[in-house]
Amino acid sequence: MQREETVRSHLAKNAIGIVAVGLVAILVSTAGTMLLLGYAFRELGPVASWIRILIFGFGVALWLAGVLIPLFFYLSGLQREALRGRESAKEH
């Protein structure tokens, strides 16, 4: 219980950083996905509709991964930092 409170308070202190990382991840992921999908549709030309749906699905998965993976690593780093700070406070 105390561990969860430590992590929660550390995340609250870094809320602006979390929002900033989220916004940058969304921006970069959106730009990258738009460029890749635009290039794919331009180069393929007229194709069957199921291929277009498949490419669009790939783009959605790519966008989600581009947003969620950086947030996951940033939040796990903050959690490690909070728990490390809690352990060092216990030692002193």
Image (cartoon, helix red, strand yellow):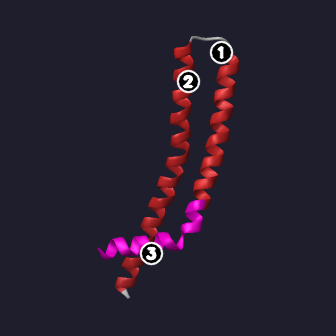
Quadrant of the snapshot with the C terminus: bottom left
Marks 1 and 2 sit apart, C-alpha to C-alpha, by 11 Å
| Residue 6 highlighted magenta (yes or no) | yes
Q: Which residue is mark 1?
A: 44
Task: Tell whether 78 sits left or right of 45.
Answer: left
**Mark 1–mark 2 contact, CB under 8 Å?**
yes
Residue identified by numbered label 3? 9
Task: Identify the image quadrant of the N terminus.
Answer: bottom left
> In the current view of this chain or complex, which residue is farthest to the front?
49
The disc label shown at residue 92, or none:
none
Badge 1 marks a residue whose secondary structure is helix
Q: Is residue 30 within the magenta segment?
A: no
Measured Cα–Cα span from mark 2 to mark 3: 42 Å
Q: Extreme left residue here?
A: 1
Tell me the magenta residue range: 1-19
At x 43%, y 66%, the residue is 79
User: For mark 2, what is the residue?
Assistant: 55
At numbered mark 3, what does the secondary structure look like: helix, strand or loop? helix
Eyeballing the image, is 79 above or below 6?
above
From mark 3 to mark 1, how far is it between C-alphas? 50 Å
From the top left corner, tell me how far across and down residue 9 is, in percent: 44, 75
Label 2: few (<14), some (14–19) or many (≥20) C-alpha neighbours in 10 Å: some
**Sequence order check, earlier mark of 3 and 1:** 3
| Amino acid residing under circle 3 | Ser
> For the residue marked with disc 1, what is the amino acid?
Leu
At horizontal 67% and vertical 40% (from top left) the residue drawn is 31
Residue in the image at 62% along x and 54% along y: 23
Q: Quadrant of residue 42?
A: top right
Q: Earlier in the sequence, mark 1 or mark 2?
A: 1
Residue 25 x/y as whole percent: 60, 50
